[in-house]
Image (cartoon, grey):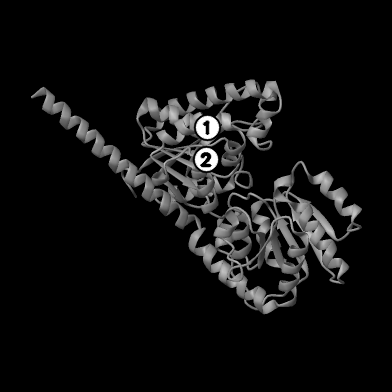
Amino acid sequence: MNENPLRLLMLAHVFPRALDDSMGAFLLHLADALAARGVQVNVIAPSAARLVAAEMFGRVRVQRFRYAPARWERLAYTGTMHELVAHGVVNKFLFVFFNMAFFFKAWLSVRACRAQILHAHWWLPGGLVGAVVSLLTRLPLVVTTHGTDVEMLRRARWATPLARFVFARARAITCGSTYLREQLLALHVADAGRVSVIPMPVSPEFSSHKLKVNRQWSDLILTVARLTAQKSLDTLIDALAILRGRGLDTRLEIIGDGPERTALEQYARDLHLQGRVEFLGELPPKDLPAHYAACAVFVLPSVREGMGLVLAEALLCGAPVVAANFGGVTDIVRDGETGLLFPARDARALAVAIERLLDDRALAMRLAVNGAARARERFTRERVAAQFAEIYGVLLNLALVNVKGADGRGEARKS
């Protein structure tokens, strides 16, 4: 047992509300894996209905902050926060209170848990709060971007000065994919020398899954996604209609929920696909491996996907994958090697890729096995936690050297 564990304060505006909550689940997997390495992890996250002020998630301590009366706390866990804030004056005022409450909780927690490193997820709001706390406490700050925050920065140029302040304060910046790193650097808000690529980890349910070499094949197409326009699920429904028109007896399962669900259900009916497209809603992570393992092809048709972690999950469960050639998915899917890529929003090209895997089971298995090996190499909790622990160690050593240097100068001045 480590007698002097590194003390980490993690800041996030989304964190699982329960052990089986899929929202922000990768942060809990990362925190738990860090705790298993001897890091003392404290998490600061917003409150929501029926959540307590503090609780333990295994070895991870989670503290929640209140930012408004309970009936007004509607910014977290209800969608993409920056989109909610952009629509409505009330939400903009709530966002101000949210950041103030976030800051005070983080600042007080630094003292209470004697934190040595701050790690903020998403540059806004967590990164901004972390930058101010770091400025006041001189603690090293790590900022991780996840995609939606980079996309918001790309669209809202007013945020550029805030982002430059945050990233200038950060001693280390990580992005979940090569694509996100390129996007961030193209916006000229961060120093390239401090930006590295470290993906988020998959759940242990996936990394411990046993691949079946002689698996039973079906004609089921599967996707797991939040039902938003960015996920381009209408393209997948179009591809299914094309495959059905060619005489293939395929069907589609869609796992997830979101604002586009009603429109997508109607679109499937308009294409006379009722009974062939099933909307299963959001499922707990523990139920997903069985669905991945049962499908013939897993498809992620998203545009501007920050990382596409569901692709790694599917591969680890033995599913061959097809993804749009756009965004961070290319860190996971190498065309013809670990999966197939198609031009984004091209339903005919997607149908061709799916049909290719349905017709050639040997190819499908080869891609799935290769993809699983790559996912296991890069996306397990242990691998990801080791990379972050290395960053924390370097920053902590630098901080100690700086303190000793300052003390030395002080002694020299006294003498």
Vertical placement of residue 108 versus 393, above or below = above
Direction left: furthest residue: 415
Could you tell me residue 251's position as x and y percent? 82, 64
Q: Secondary structure at mark 2?
A: loop
Q: Give the residue at mark 2.
A: 187
Vertical placement of residue 103 versus 369, above or below = above
| Tag count | 2
Q: Give the residue at mark 1.
A: 160
Do callouts 1 and 2 mark residues in contact (Cβ within 8 Å)? Answer: yes
Q: CA distance from mark 1 to mark 2?
A: 8 Å
Specify few, some or many for label 2: CA neighbours under 10 Å numbering under 14, 14-19, or 20 or more: some
Residue 113 placement: quadrant:
top left
Q: Tell me which amino acid carries mark 1.
A: Thr
Residue at 61%, 54% (x, y): give it: 308
Q: As drawn, is 62 to the left or to the right of 397?
A: right
Q: As drawn, is 404 to the left or to the right of 7?
A: left
Residue at 78%, 70% (x, y): give it: 219
Q: Secondary structure at mark 1?
A: helix
Residue at 65%, 30% (x, y): give it: 75
Q: First in sequence: mark 1 or mark 2? A: 1
Q: Is residue 180 visible?
A: yes
Could you tell me residue 203's position as x and y percent? 57, 55
Q: Tell me which amino acid carries mark 2.
A: Leu
Could you tell me residue 270's position as x and y percent? 91, 52
* Residue closest to the eye, 84 or 214: 84
Could you tell me residue 62's position as x and y percent? 52, 37
